[in-house]
Image (cartoon, helix red, strand yellow):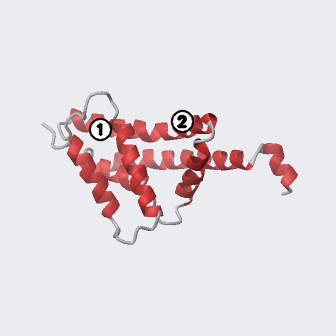
Amino acid sequence: MSSGQVIYYFSSKEHILLETLAWREQQETAERRSALPRAAPGWPRLELFVDLYLPSSLTDSVWILWMEAWARASHSAEVSLFLDTLMRPWREDLAEIVDQGIAEGVFRAPAPGGDFPLRFCAVLDGLSVLQLRQMPDLPPGRLTELAMNSAHAELGPGR
């Protein structure tokens, strides 16, 4: 395909990046929404969510796209809004996991304000960046353990 044909469909390299990320996120959302109900509610489902969220490897293509997109977001309100839209399904799925866990008495309600999904996804983003930076002292599974420790501090135990 010639560069002219590419530019016909995409206005810039940034547009290609964002559309590719959106396409991958749609796939990941479908896969996640298929996998989560197969895990037991409460802590097992939350841990699966964490495992699905964190990078699968140092070369995780979706996370590489996210890192590239984040670098552009600080210069563009439009990109920032686009990325927030892509994150919304993650936060919605997390909120559903937490609400179900609270209803079943497995989790206690997080701090008022409904900000737990935003805060916890921010924790997961930070842990993901640590992994992608190739931190030498992080053995496999440590990031999941750190994330679950954070969740336990705020959500557990239930009633």
- The one nearer the camera, 53 or 139, is 139
Residue 97 sits above or below residue 3 on the image:
above
Give the mark toward the camera: 1 or 2: 2
Mark 1 lies on residue: 98
Could you tell me how far apart the alpha carbons at marks 1 and 2 are, in whole angstroms? 21 Å
Rendering quarter of residue 78:
top right
Along the viewing direction, whichever of 111 and 20 lies nearer the viewer: 111
The residue lying at 34 percent from left, 49 percent from top is 38
Given contact means CB atoms under 8 Å apart, are the residues at marks 1 and 2 in contact? no
What residue is drawn where x is 21% and y is 40%? 107
Assign a secondary structure to mark 1: helix
Question: For this view, does 24 lie left or right of residue 102?
Answer: right
Query: In screen coordinates, is 66 left or right of 33?
Result: right
Q: Residue at x 73, y 50 (%)?
A: 13
Give residue 116's position: percent from left, percent from top. 32, 37
Please, what is the three-letter code of the amino acid marked with disc 2?
Thr
Instruction: Tell me where residue 157 sits by quadrant.
Output: top left
- Numbered badge on residue 85: 2
Q: Name which residue lies at 41% across and 38% down.
A: 91
Amino acid of disc 1: Val
